[in-house]
Image (cartoon, helix red, strand yellow):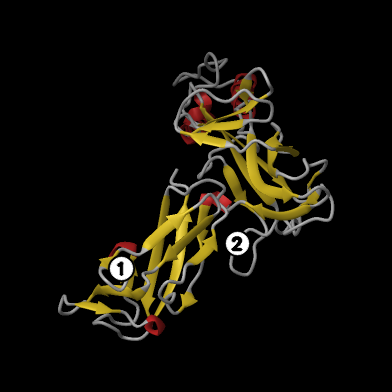
Amino acid sequence: MLRMVVCLIAGVLLGAAPAGAQNCAGSFPTTLANGTNADATQVMANFTYLLNCINNLPTPSAAATTSSPRQTVSAGPVTTAGLPNFLPASSGSLSITMQNVTAAAPLAVTAANNNDSTTGGQKDQIGVTTSNLSWSSLAASTTNYLYVTVASNGTLTTGATTLAPVYQWGGTPGTANGQFTFNIGEMKGYLGNGSVAAQAYAVVVGEAVTSGSAVTSAVGYAYNGRYDSGWAATLPPAATPASRSHNIGIQPGRAEFIAECTTANLGFAVGDQLRWGSFYGDDASTNVPNSLYTGRLTVGVTPGSSGAWKAINRTNGAQGTLTGASWKYKMVADRGW
């Protein structure tokens, strides 16, 4: 009976943790054979071997784990619209301090460093703070790019540079002091020191524009490189640009304008949606495409000077003009990687 119990327990332990077996060198101290009586000392030696094997299994670091998206401000305090709310709009000095960061709303970032050459796993370091960090001694009369570096234990240290971060699919990182470069293709960040650009677990989290003595405006970058403006009633009038601040921090790889029918119109039912390619305008002489444009921090649309929102009737295929008040709209953007 004892032999059976020992074999069953050993089988369960080994079967439940196959990863553990590959981290254990050698074999059991004693091989128990059928038809022989098990000695308690031998049995306990085998159990001790199993215990040590399991206790010595590697455990993942809290600051290095799998994450998606990578290289981003991952989460933090938000407005009622769900947008980042961890930086004040301005500051009365050449310093700026986070706001609203608490244990209930921690600020988390993910810094990427390629993938492990043995396991293939993501080599990301995740950092988090539950207190409001500060950036001091910012450069005057310019744009300061605010970043944090992530230590191996997940703690964050602030830094700032006047050099705009570079996000490129590949190429040589800039070596200028304070130049952050992220190579998207290899998922790896570099920070220049004036002579070389070493790998760095750093994440640019926002920017602050300064005057000679104060921060005149500041934005925290969009979480996970994504933005959704939320719905606004009534399509923008003719010749009237409408824009939103996506605050992704780089030109978005994708942007979209979405209109949703709220009152049946031009053959469309309530709840039907139209995407950007469905619309065109009129400049009083000919039909022209409406413009959807993006910037590093903004996304917007400019409808035609007349007949602003033309589309094809859903039911008969005829050209028609949408009734602006019968629709609501929103803009979305993401960095695309």
The amino acid type found where label 2 is placed reads Leu
Q: Name the one closer to the observer, 219 or 104.
A: 219
Q: Give neighbour class at mark 1: few <14, some 14-19, many 20+ (Cα, 10 Å).
A: many
Q: Are marks 1 and 2 in contact (CB under 8 Å)?
A: no
> Mark 2 or mark 1, which is nearer the start of the sequence?
2
Residue topped by disc 1: 279
Estimate the x, y position of residue 155 in percent, counting from the top left. 74, 38
Which sits in the foreground, 171 or 121? 171
Mark 2 secondary-structure assignment:
loop
Q: Is residue 67 above or below residue 323?
A: above
Is 106 on the left-hand or right-hand side of 94? left
Using the rendered view, name the quadrant where residue 142 is placed: top right
Q: Is residue 73 above or below residue 261?
A: above
Determine which of the numbered discs, if any, sits on residue 83 in the image.
Answer: 2
Decide which of 52, 86 is in the foreground and name it: 86
Could you tell me if residue 77 is visible in this image? yes
Direction from residue 177 to residue 91 in the image, left or right: right
To which quarter of the image does residue 313 belong?
Answer: bottom left
**Which residue appears at 42% of the width and 65% of the height?**
302
Q: Residues within 10 Å of mark 2 (few under 14, many from 20)?
A: many
- Is 114 situated above or below 258? above
Estimate the x, y position of residue 249 in percent, counting from the top left. Answer: 57, 48
C-alpha gap between disc 1 and disc 2: 28 Å
Q: Position of residue 292 (x, y in %)?
A: 40, 60
